[in-house]
Amino acid sequence: MSLTPVTGSATSQKITPLTLLERKQAHQPITALTAYDYATARLADEAGIDFILVGDSLAMVVMGLESTLPVTVDEMLHHTRAARRAVRRAMLVVDMPFGSYHASLDQGVANAARFVKEGGAEAVKVEGGRPELIERIIAAEIPVVGHIGLTPQSVHRMGGYKVQGKTAAQYARLRKDARELEIAGASAIVLEGMPRELAAEITADLEIPTIGIGAGIDCDGQILVFHDLVNLTFAPPARFVRRYGDAAELFRNAITAYRDDVVERRYPSESESYHLPKGTADALEAAAVGFQTPRLRRKA
Ligand code: KIV
């Protein structure tokens, strides 16, 4: 066991939808990051990230799938529970995966409730302009974060992962979607993959905060995918990704050094091994039950 359980209770600075709103009003940037397991969620929380998202991007960066579409509610719940055990201060948000809210409003509300009840999420995020669904989920006492622009669950409709809002029609549509999500009661809106000018205009239009990813500097906060941030994605990064660390290099070096040490019998050392108490070793030798120290046995 290498992980130390989190101790202590939630701090007085617990981040809630109200905190996010206050941040916007005070012009204080909101920090957001994805996390999908105990260790990374704990590090993000301890680093003071405000908004931790168990994103459906886990389908790609954790499960190695081609898109976010196949990930299921049960798989998302599994990761949400792991992150939940770590997060104390941040607001813990989970992505409703593709197919978990598309069949009907009732289906969306039921699945949102599962994320709160079984996963411990404090809010859910849904992609697209779906004000009616957002109203229904909020009526069930569950805060909702919207997500518009380049919405990965719409990859087939968009014809690929393309920046959205570049035509006048798309520009107007996204501004309208954002306003409708605010009226429906969304706590915040993620703006993904859109021109900076559009994100700035939406941010100025709304009272609720916007959290950008590939949407420029004018949003009220920024979010990145953890694996992009630390170079664990095995692919050339998108333009907006800034690498803050090289975990691939760190892990590769550590794994290679471990492998070499095992092959060369340099690992484990004496100090990394457990030993019989002297009394037991002496008793075994005296009883002549064939016991020899490991060192003698190897030489023989
Ligand atoms: O799933 C995810 O990681 C996301 C972020 C890109 C906002 O939705």
Image (cartoon, helix red, strand yellow):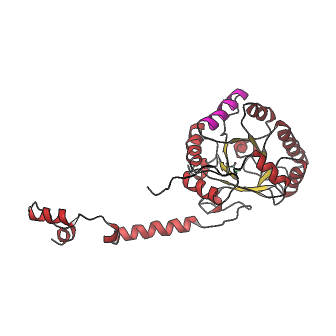
> Image quadrant for the N terminus?
bottom left
Give coordinates of residue 109: x percent, y percent: 69, 31
Examine the image and state in which quarter residue 277 appears.
bottom left
Q: Is residue 163 visible?
A: no
Q: Nearer the viewer, residue 126 or 113?
A: 113
Give coordinates of residue 25: x percent, y percent: 85, 53
Asked if residue 116 lies in the magenta stretch, the reply is yes
> Image quadrant for the C terminus?
bottom left
Look at 46% across and 65% down and name the residue there.
255
Q: Is residue 182 left or right of residue 36?
A: right
Give coordinates of residue 2: x percent, y percent: 46, 58
| Position above or below: 84 against 234 | above
Give coordinates of residue 10: x percent, y percent: 63, 49
Magenta segment, which residues?
A: 97-117
Look at 33% across and 70% down and name the residue there.
271
Q: Is residue 273 visible?
A: yes
